[in-house]
Image (spheres, rainbow, N blue to C red):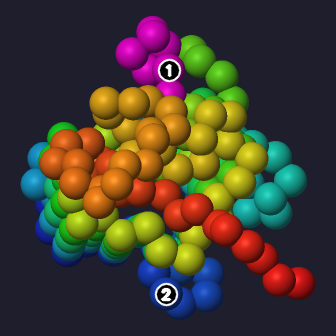
């Protein structure tokens, strides 16, 4: 856990700098209580380094009450609950260039733990979700959380003032050309 720690690097940009973070009964990386400006980069969370077996944590990454963190280029797979959970008014975090797949493999805790998404943003604004590959998660790949756990309806003008990233509308594709 990084409780109130600022500007730490877990992993790094250099080849081989990433860690294997797996097999924990708790979350693999937790940024809690004003842990701001940290970087989690190029790690293997919940899967072995040859990507041939899951070694689940309960969640991959949890950002709780913390701001300005970067989760970059990680492989986040096979966790019991969510791959990434952002909540308790965490804002301005960047989740980019990660592969987030096959999370939500099964409950071992109580019903309050029962969320099985790739990325779940319950509270907070300005959290950037950029260029991630997110697929095969048990519930939703990306869920902006309360008040609708599950798909939230789009609304005209997108004037929401509550929920993760203010319940930003999802894109609607009207055509595609191959």
Question: Could you tell me how far apart the alpha carbons at marks 2 and 1 are, in whole angstroms?
Answer: 33 Å
Image quadrant in which you'd find residue 15: bottom right
Residue 71 image label: none
Residue wearing tag 2:
13
Q: Secondary structure at mark 2?
A: loop
Residue at position x 80%, y 59% from top? 51
Residue at position x 48%, y 74% from top? 130
Tell me, yes or no, whether the highlighted magenta stretch contains residue 112. Answer: yes
Q: Is residue 170 visible?
A: yes
Of the pair 127 and 106, the residue shown nearer to us: 127
Q: Quadrant of the C terminus?
A: bottom right
Residue 101: percent from the left, percent from the top?
69, 52
Residue at position x 39%, y 30% from top? 148
What segment carries the magenta color? 109-115
Of the pair 29 and 150, the residue shown nearer to us: 150
Single out the residue that lies furthest toward the top: 110
Residue 73: percent from the left, percent from the top?
55, 75
Q: Nearer the viewer, mark 2 or mark 1?
A: 1
Residue at position x 31%, y 30% from top? 147
Image quadrant in which you'd find residue 126: bottom left
Relative to 148, is 82 above or below?
Answer: below
Residue wearing tag 1:
114
User: Callout 1: few (<14), some (14-19), or many (20+) C-alpha neighbours within 10 Å?
Assistant: some
User: Callout 2: few (<14), some (14-19), or many (20+) C-alpha neighbours within 10 Å?
Assistant: some
Q: Is residue 3 visible?
A: no
Tell me, yes or no, whether the highlighted magenta stretch contains residue 144. Answer: no
Left or right: 35, with 108 as reference point? left
Q: Secondary structure at mark 1?
A: loop
Left or right: 13, with 141 as reference point? left
């Amino acid at each position: 856990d990084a409780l109130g720690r600022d500007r730490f690097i877990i992993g790094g940009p250099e080849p081989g700098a990433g860690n294997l973070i797996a097999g924990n009964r708790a979350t693999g990386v937790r940024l809690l209580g004003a842990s701001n400006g940290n970087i989690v980069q190029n790690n293997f969370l919940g899967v072995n380094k040859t990507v041939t077996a899951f070694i689940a944590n309960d969640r991959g990454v949890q950002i709780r009450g913390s701001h300005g963190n970067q989760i970059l280029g990680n492989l986040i797979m096979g966790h019991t609950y969510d791959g990434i959970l952002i909540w308790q008014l965490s804002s301005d975090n960047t989740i980019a260039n990660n592969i987030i797949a096959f999370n939500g493999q099964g409950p071992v805790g109580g019903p309050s733990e029962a969320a099985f998404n790739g990325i779940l943003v319950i509270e907070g604004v300005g959290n950037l979700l950029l260029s991630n590959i997110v697929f095969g998660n048990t519930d939703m790949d990306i869920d902006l959380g309360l008040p609708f756990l599950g798909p939230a309806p789009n609304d005209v003008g997108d004037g929401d003032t509550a929920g993760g990233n203010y319940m930003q509308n999802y894109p609607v594709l009207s055509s595609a050309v191959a």
